[in-house]
Image (tube, rainbow, N blue to C red):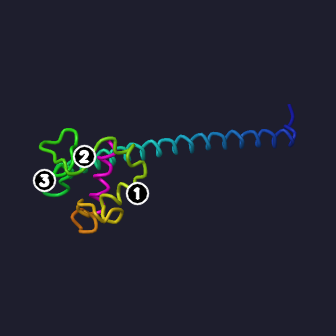
Amino acid sequence: MGRMPIYKLKFVSHKEEIMRKAASNTILKSSLAIIIAGMALVSASAIASSVEEGKKLAFDRKQGNCLACHMIEGGISPGDIGPPLIAMKARFPDRAKLRAQIYDATAANPESIMIPFGRHKALSDAQIDSIIDYMYTL
C-alpha cells in the first residue's frame, strides 16, 4: 500500500484533537464536581459547628443567656419576659432582621428591654452569627 493521502491525515488528527478535548473536559468537570462536593462538606461541617456554638451561647448563663428571658426547647428554667424562641426561621425569614434584633433591639423598638448584645459588645459578631445559626434550627 502506498502513503495515506494528506487530507485523511488531517481528518484523523482533527478527530483525535476532538477526542482529546472531550476527555480533558470530562476530567475538568469531574475535578470541579469533586471540589464542589468537598466545599459542601466543609461548609456543612462549619455550619454544624456554628449551630453547636450558638446553642452553647444561648444556654450559657454567663454569655448569651437567652434562657434568662426566653423559653427555648430543651432549656432549663427559662424566663418568660421575651417571646418563646420557636419557629425562628418562619418568624424572621430575613436573617439580617434577626441579626439586627439581637445586635440592638432598641434600634427598631426604643422601648425594648432586650440587651443590645452587639452594641454593648456583650457578644462578638461571630457569636451573634452562631446564635442565629442555632435559632434557625428552632
Query: Foreground: 82 or 126?
Result: 82
Q: Residues within 10 Å of mark 2 (few under 14, many from 20)?
A: some
Q: CA distance from mark 1 to mark 2?
A: 20 Å
Q: Residue at x 34, y 66 (%)?
A: 107
Q: Give the numbered dot on residue 61.
A: 3
Of labels 3 and 1, earlier in sequence is 3
Q: Residue furthest top?
A: 1
Which of the 4 quarters of the picture holds residue 3?
top right
Of labels 1 and 2, earlier in sequence is 2
Q: Is residue 20 left or right of residue 136?
A: right
Q: Is residue 104 left or right of residue 1?
A: left
Q: Secondary structure at mark 3?
A: loop
Amino acid at pointer 1: Ala
Amino acid at pointer 3: Arg
What residue does disc 1 label?
96
Amino acid at pointer 2: Glu
Q: Is residue 57 left or right of residue 46?
A: left
What residue does disc 2 label?
52
Question: Is 136 covered by the magenta stretch?
Answer: yes
Q: Secondary structure at mark 1?
A: helix
Q: What kind of secondary structure does the magenta stretch mostly adopt?
A: helix
Q: Residues within 10 Å of mark 3 (few under 14, many from 20)?
A: few
Q: Quadrant of the C terminus?
A: top left
Residue 23 position within the rendered picture, expressed as x and y whole percent measured from the top left:
62, 39
Residue 133 position within the rendered picture, expressed as x and y whole percent measured from the top left:
32, 49
Of labels 2 and 3, earlier in sequence is 2
Q: Which residues are magenta?
A: 125-138
Residue 36 position within the rendered picture, expressed as x and y whole percent measured from the top left:
47, 45
